[in-house]
Image (cartoon, rainbow, N blue to C red):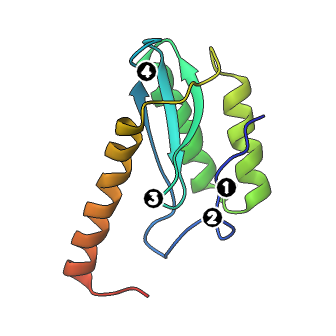
């Protein structure tokens, strides 16, 4: 299993819990599911042949969050391991520019939210 990048608290502030999405790998053409818990590190969780499978995997994440099954470290790791095991292939490392693009959105949204709502720290 991969060593998942999960911070100890699983979330960085009350308004940011996790984010996930899909990105197409430029070499394999597989859709890869990513998850970040802190907006600073991307976990490449699974690789699928179709974008629809990314949607289904993300739905699994959201259902687990809704029923409260996600917010401890052990359960988060178990969920990521399950998604990893059920994927069509092992996800490959993405080019750095793709990760930087994903993470740049969090910096921008974080700055915008801070300007609109004040400092949360």
Whether label 4 touches label 1, CB < 8 Å: no
Q: CA distance from mark 2 to mark 3?
A: 11 Å
Q: Which residue is mark 1?
A: 70
Which labelled disc corresponds to residue 10? 2
Q: Crowdedness of circle 2 by 10 Å Cα count: few (<14), some, many (20+)?
A: some
Residue 46, above or below 117: above
Q: Position of residue 92 (x, y in %)?
A: 57, 24
Q: CA distance from mark 3 to mark 1?
A: 17 Å
Disc 3 designates what residue? Answer: 39
Q: Nearer the viewer, residue 4 or 78?
A: 4
- Look at discs 2 and 3 and give the one toward the viewer: 3
Report the Cα–Cα distance between label 3 and label 4.
20 Å
Q: Earlier in the sequence, mark 4 or mark 1?
A: 4
Confirm or deny contact between disc 1 and disc 2 (CB under 8 A): yes
The span from disc 4 to disc 2 (Cα, nearest Å) is 27 Å
Q: Is residue 99 above or below residue 118?
A: above
Would you name the residue on which mark 4 appears? 25
Query: In the picture, which quadrant includes the N terminus?
Result: top right
Mark 3 / mark 1, whichever is N-terminal: 3
Select label 4 or label 2 by which is in front: 4
Q: Give the residue drawn at x 35%, y 38%.
A: 97
Given contact means CB atoms under 8 Å apart, are the residues at marks 3 and 1 in contact?
A: no
Q: Using the numbered discs, state the Cα–Cα distance from disc 1 to disc 2 in whole angstroms.
A: 9 Å
Discs 2, 3 touching: Cβ within 8 Å? no
Residue 95: quadrant of the picture: top left
């Amino acid at each position: 299993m991969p060593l998942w990048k999960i911070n100890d608290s699983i979330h960085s502030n009350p308004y940011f819990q996790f984010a996930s999405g899909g990105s197409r790998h430029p070499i394999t053409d597989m859709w890869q599911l990513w998850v970040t818990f802190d907006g600073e590190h991307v976990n490449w969780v699974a690789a699928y042949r179709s974008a629809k499978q990314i949607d289904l995997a993300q739905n699994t994440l959201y259902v687990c969050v809704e029923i409260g099954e996600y917010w401890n470290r052990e359960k988060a790791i178990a969920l990521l391991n399950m998604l990893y095991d059920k994927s069509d292939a092992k996800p490959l490392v993405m080019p750095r520019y793709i990760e930087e693009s994903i993470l740049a959105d969090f910096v921008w949204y974080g700055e915008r939210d801070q300007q609109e709502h004040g400092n949360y720290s």
